[in-house]
Image (cartoon, rainbow, N blue to C red):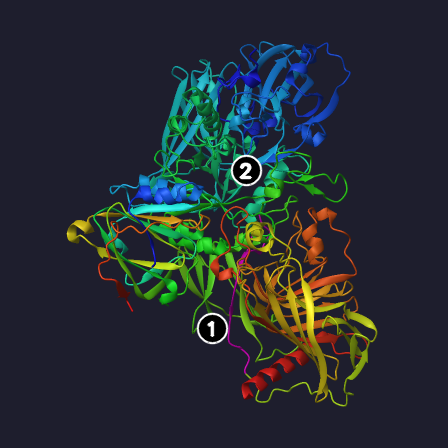
Amino acid sequence: MSHPWRDATRTGVGRLAGHAYVFGYDDVAAALRGAREGSQGFVPLSGEWDFRYYDSPLRMPATDVQAGATADGWSAVTVPHVWQADGFGAWQYTDERYAFPNDFPAVPALNPTGVYRRWVRLPEAQPGEQRILRFDGAEACCEVWVNGRPVGWSTGSRLAAEYDITDVAVPGDNLIAVRLTQYASSSYLEGQDMWSSAGIFRDVYTYTRPATRLDDVVVDTTMDDADGAHLAVAVRASGAAAVRWWVQADERRRLLEGAAPVVDGDARIEVDVPSVRWWHPEHPELYTLVLEPCDAAGRVSQHVPVRFGFRDVRIEDGLLLLNRRYVELHGVNRHDADPTRGRAVTMDRVRAELLLMKRHNINAVRTSHYPNDPRFYALCDELGLLVVAETDLETHGMEVIGAPNRLAEDPALEPIFVDRIERHVAAQRNHPSIVAWSLGNEAGWGRNFAAMYRRCKELDPVRPVLYEEDRDASTVDIVSTMYSRVSQMDDFGRHPHSKPRFLVEYAHAMGNGPGGLADYQAVFDAYPSIQGHFVWEWSDHAVDVGGAGAPAYRYGGDFGDDPNNGNFCIDGLVFPSLEPSPGLVEYAQVICPVRVREVPGSPDTVRIVNRRYDSDLGDVALVVTDECDGVPARQARVPATAVPAREQAELVIAGWQDVRRGEDVAPDGEWHRTVRVVVVEPTAFSEPEAEIGRFQWPIASPVPAAADVARTPAIGGLAEPQVVTEQACVRVEAAGHVWSFDTVTGSLASLTRDGRPIISRGPAARLWRPLIDNHADVAARLWTANLLHLRIESCDSFEWRRAGDAVVVEARASVAPPSVDFGLRCVYRWEIAADGGARLDLDAVPYGTYRDLVPALGLDMQVPAGLGRIEYFGYGPGENYPDSRTAATLGRYRTTAAALATPYVVPQDHGVRGGTRWVAHLDQDGAGLLVRSDVPLEWSTWLHDASTIQATRHRDELPAPGPNLTVNLDAAVLGLGSASFGAEVGEAYRIRLSPYRLGLELATFGGHGAPTLDAALASTAGKAAGRALEAEVR
Amino acid sequence: VSGYLYASLSELADYNAGTVSWDRAITALRAARPTDPQFARSIGATVTYWVTRPVDMVRPELTAHRRYRTLLRPLGGSVDVVVAPIDRLTAVSEYDDQNDVELFTGPGRALRLQAGSVLLVDLDEAWAVVRPADGDAGAAGALAVVRLTPDAEPARPRQPSGDAALPWGGDVAVAS
């Protein structure tokens, strides 16, 4: 027996042909407002529906869709939704596999099914008027009844479906009923990497079209050689003799107007416009074309607004041109994903996402891997985002069985494939933001794609088409690849194709990462032929099961779903809450459209490079700050200057103002110049003075060196440290400090000052940090088998002695994983001074044959959780790793241990701040521990220890923070890479098991009678300088 | 001895086919034609390949890669190359992550690659195209270059193939 959900030969019955997403209005004012709710006959049907859930469509009684259905057994749901979010059925996440047997076109008999009913009151239809029922998105096979009469069905979950219900609707109450199956034969073509879910997940509504009406409109604009515009509009109309039209430039001004006769249902408008404001993502200027179909008597039946932009897209000499100028797409891949609503995203969330993209310098979005809500494109038009508009087509599950091209090559499926691009292009082709069509994603290659391409070109001869599986662009207009490594992109750039190239997916942003964005960008920037790159992906797709409480994000496998791909869906630049991840901050800097550089030999000048494509820098100012040891000393503002697009200029810095915090700057301190690039005026997506990038470089001290720099005098008269030996313990006591060593392990057990704990567990060498998702592959190959996460310490010797007025403690220890024949031989040399401060020199030398990658070379220690306020001098303010540090600048930052806990859904290594010269942990009274390093550290402080972080699979399952913080002081940490799917860590950011040394000055500060942090800094700096001098003398 | 030499694509396949990456590399070599446009193509993220003129590949240093193995196959005419283990060479450039290139000078094994043969240069080796071997005819020839992901299994040992590669001078020094 044939059922719609098993019909692989058609995509629907009774569904109307696709057309431009426009509405008619009764009056001009409403047309210019363009709110669809005010359009002719518009009745929203989103909201509460009756809902029944079955395990098979065949279990639905016929009465469910009839007016007389019993009220028993129905639940209320709010559409749009996916029913899994309302507790019906189960979530399932798969990346590549189908969640059902791969036996095309068969569909499991047990096929989750939802039946929806809703009454709607409709007015009496006017003569000749059409009433349309529209679904913007329903997954997967959607059958529709009105007043018990079937009106049609449709597949293509993320393609709109419209039905003419004029003949079945009645004045008064009407029953709309829907049967929706989760799976259909079409599901084989919708195997995207995302949660499997179902429901009416976009809006449902009905509207009318009068007897004299516009049926479709296609707007095309081109730029002539003199920057003039040609506007071409093709109109399809019913019952009309002519179409009057005008172009509204702004609230008061009409740019153009005219009328065109309708002949055989078609009208055409062609007009040259010498001067227009061109649409560009940097200045998204929009106009409104208003079309008014008229009958033979000249009566206007509706006013149909079309928001459009004058925009020219073409490929010339192998390059993609926007308005006949070069452009690059700095983009992201975006899925519809909401932690509580699944794919049923609200437009408020969509808008928030697009604003966030704009604030982070992103200028392009690929709608991976399906058409979005029709309003999405209008938002991109309005905000200025270039769109690679992909249609709803992926057959990844076929690749899993080794037959990636099976469906693409099946001639019987050509209409099915073609339908998916036809409906998409017909609906969206008037949007200036769309610069390219995508035929789908990971669906093999074959004749059906060639047919899609041809149909796409029939509908839109102008825009280029891409599809990654056409690897050499034998058919499509843009050649594209995924996850090509940096050096591969360099190969592509050196040996360029005759067509523009996009990297449609790269930099897999799973968990902590991606690293290496700057390396990719350097290659993109080097070759004009590489014109687009899209990070995978924009947002984590988690399901929040926390209810009204704190978020509790879940991923594949957490719902008993099998098969699943675990947390492979937690791979976004923004967390589920839309909080930007450190990866997004890094990306924003890497693609910053303004670059600022020093001018060698000219300290009062900076070079500014305008990397925009069509705008000058008349809106951008520079805030220049010279900093000494991370503290601002003086500041100047370089006002906006209209540097043209793609050009650069040298700007003079003048008007320095002293911004010292009261203390004198040290001429011999470490000086840097930090330049913040700000957009002065507010924009549609940003506040005034919004920072779009920052740059920094070292400078010579602008402060004249004093003839005789006063030094803090050494504190004299202190008693020499006392040493107390007990069973398995040596205590060194000095100036209220008690350094307690465990002579069995050789390690510092604790430090107290005046009885207050300062160090809970002393520093110990280790090779491990909690695994990040992007290191899973290397961990599987190298680390797990070698048990690198386990640390066994063995003390080989422990001794202490007096050295002048200090006490030296030296422990020799081995640190190694169990069962393997390699590890570290460590020497810990402590020198404890009479003032209670100490210096630790760690000398770690590997033994055994292992010399491959390790996560870190350094040590960890613990301090009481009460020391949770933190101040440091290093890279910040955000998390940064060696291959993800472009956005970070050296500075003196204040933070807290809690704020350092980056909220990765899956707990993993986090929080590193590189280049750390010193870090201080403070209690609420400002007392604490200062650690100053001889060489810049990769420092981080965690609320939990490494094993707890490693063992916890969901952030909300982390136990309450314990009594201690874990402080990591590393000589080096491994870069992030993005090898959870893609690029390995670059060679420059790899660390292998090798000898390392750390030299640390430890001092307490604050509290009664003790030095302040600044005094402790001066003191430890003096000691460090003294040691440097000693080394020099030696 | 450095460089893996295979008399033919079939021989390369006999020893190495059977994994995704190697199969892709073999597919790439099989697809390469002397008349191909000279743009780089890829198969997945594991194989990149292009066809070029040997004369355009000549450079004074030996090139080594840390991330991608290199396969060279003359498609017409023969090509003289030098290949050497990098631990016998002197580095003359920093390794560059952006192009996966590190340059060396020093002595190497000189080989004449006949049309149709395949030379595999592993990650611990460096290579240089010295010249097309056939004079003007060779200069007009074509060379298929394949870069193969490090994820590929190491090449399996191949039997010495005296027919494919003709030493034309034993060890030679490149730009030393």
> Residue A680, percent across and down?
55, 56
Q: Chain of mark 2?
A: A
Dot 2 and dot 1 residues touching (CB under 8 Å): no
- Find disc 1 in the rendering and name its residue: A603
* Image quarter hosting the N terminus of chain A: top right
Is A292 positioned to the left or the right of A94 in the image?
left
Count neighbours of disc 2 (C-alpha within 10 A) and say few if under 14, some if 14 to 19, many if 20 or more.
some
Position of A146 relative to A873 (above/below): above
- In front: A750, or A447? A750
Q: Amino acid at mark 1?
A: Pro
Position of A350 relative to A962 (above/below): above
> Residue A526, percent across and down?
39, 54
* Image quarter hosting the C terminus of chain A: bottom right
Q: What numbered label is drawn on residue A841? A: none
Residue at the far right: name it: A755
> Residue A275, percent across and down?
38, 40
Q: What numbered label is drawn on residue A379? A: 2
Q: Residue at x 39, y 52 (%)?
A: B69
- In front: A400, or A499? A400
Residue A442 is a magenta residue: no
Q: Residue at x 71, y 80 (%)?
A: A799
Disc 2 secondary structure class: helix
Q: Chain of mark 1?
A: A
Q: Amino acid at mark 2?
A: Leu
Q: Main secondary structure of the magenta part?
A: loop
Q: Is residue A683 visible?
A: no
- In this rendering, the count of numbered labels is 2
Residue at the far front: name it: B159
The boundaries of the magenta stretch are A679-704
Q: Is residue A411 visible?
A: yes
Residue A689 is a magenta residue: yes
Disc 1 secondary structure class: loop
